[in-house]
Image (tube, rainbow, N blue to C red):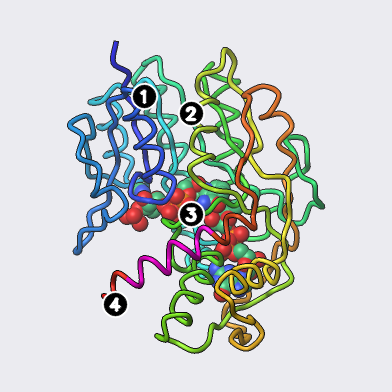
Amino acid sequence: MVKRAFVTGITGQDGSYLAELLLEKGYEVHGLVRRSSTINRGRIDHIADPDLHLHYGDLTDGVSIVNLIHAIEPHEVYNLGAQSHVKVSFEMPEYTASTDGIGALRLLEAIRAAEIDCRFYQASTSEMFGASAPPQNETTPFHPRSPYGAAKLYAHYVTTNYREAYGVFACSGILFNHESPRRGENFLTRKVTLGVAAIVLGVRDSLQLGNLDAVRDWGYAPEYVEGMWRMLQQDEPGDFVLATGQGRTVRQFVQTAFEHAGLDWEQYVTHDEQYERPTEVHSLIGDPSRAREVLGWKAETDPDQLARLMVDADIEQLRRLLGS
Ligand code: NDP
Ligand code: GDR
């Protein structure tokens, strides 16, 4: 029997890697895409597979969600769609709540109402731990520090509730930061590696950043989508932290990236307070022991290797673009 998966956020970083993984495994993949005036599918354009089907809809539009779940009758749903930028969530708190929080509820309710046997993956986040001290694991208390973190916490709890109340096979992956050459350009890692590439190739001469003291646990995104899939293949549903277990400050990430290109970061990086948040999450370092024991999952790429591979990818891409 061919398994059908429905993926929200398929045009995003994780959605694109997950679509590749599921297609490789023989799934029929259905992706939710938003209508926009310019086509926004750069991360999945290269996939020429007849088993990939795209459908218009939006997590804020319950009717489209209900109709798609009824029409597709998926065996697995991966809810990766979100307004995923923490700083932007302070500018658009209500929209973030509707998409990232109630969006999960809309999907779960559509699955329940359709009376289908369907497993559900929720993209939870280390941002839910917020002010709780590291190392964080599945039992660490939550203390979100942004509208994004709070919205994701609602989605996390409602996922647990549908598991307990209705027996839905529903899992939350509590994922720490994971990055790649497909990372959105206004997240820290990609902003830095794009900046390094632009400086190396003489296109710009400085990079403006916010807080350099925050600590994050940065892993490599393709490894994390494998973990998502494994969660839905277990006998019992549950929640899992995915992380490398290694923390780096923003400053350390910046230094590694610049050094890899033979540059002294202090000559190029300046501070701009517009990139600071009203409340910052100071330190996130995950403890992925449970994922290792139950899922047999382990991050292979450490934050320093990640910085280097992203710098290499951005230099190569910019070179091609400049024809040099
Ligand atoms: P991206 O920002 O790269 O992708 C987000 C996706 O969600 C895009 O496909 C976007 O569509 C879609 N989307 C946004 N708003 C809506 C909406 N209203 N309705 C339907 N789809 C929408 O995120 P990532 O791939 O990095 O992350 C995937 C998920 O994992 C997100 O939920 C994120 O919050 C969560 N997460 C990410 C972590 C990370 O470090 N990357 C860590 C922990 C959790 P479009 O392309 O049209 O904008
Ligand atoms: P984060 O990622 O908030 O951890 O959320 P981001 O890359 O935006 O910030 C990481 C850290 O870097 C600091 N920082 C800056 N951040 C950005 N974006 N731009 C800057 O110029 C800058 N300067 C310093 C931030 O203050 C922060 O401390 C990501 C998202 O993918 C979420 O969706 C996901 O849930 C979490 O990771 C886990």
Looking at marks 1 and 2 on the same chain, the residue that comes earlier in the sequence is marked by 1
Q: Which residue does the numbered mark 1 point to in the structure image?
A: 25
Name which residue lies at 75% across and 40% down. Answer: 287
State the extent of the magenta-drawn residues as a range: 309-319
The three-letter code of the residue at mark 4 reads Leu
Q: Quadrant of residue 258?
A: bottom right
Name which residue lies at 31% across and 30% down. Answer: 23
Check mark 3 vs ligand 1: CB closer than 8 Å? yes or no: no
Looking at marks 1 and 4 on the same chain, the residue that comes earlier in the sequence is marked by 1
Looking at marks 4 and 3 on the same chain, the residue that comes earlier in the sequence is marked by 3
Q: Is residue 134 above or below residue 3?
A: below
Q: Are marks 1 and 2 in contact (CB under 8 Å)?
A: yes
Q: Is residue 12 above or below residue 146?
A: above
For numbered disc 2, what is the local secondary structure?
A: helix
Residue 98 at least partly seen: no
Q: Nearer the viewer, mark 4 or mark 3?
A: 4
Q: Is residue 214 left or right of residue 37?
A: right
Q: Which residue does the numbered mark 3 point to in the structure image?
A: 180
**Image disc number at residue 322:** 4
Give percent across and percent down for residue 316.
38, 66
Name which residue lies at 30% across and 69% down. Answer: 320
- The dominant secondary structure in magenta is helix
**Image disc number at residue 229:** 2
Name which residue lies at 40% across and 14% down. Answer: 117
**Residue 311 shown in magenta:** yes
Looking at marks 3 and 1 on the same chain, the residue that comes earlier in the sequence is marked by 1
Q: Label 3 to label 1, Cα distance in Å?
A: 22 Å
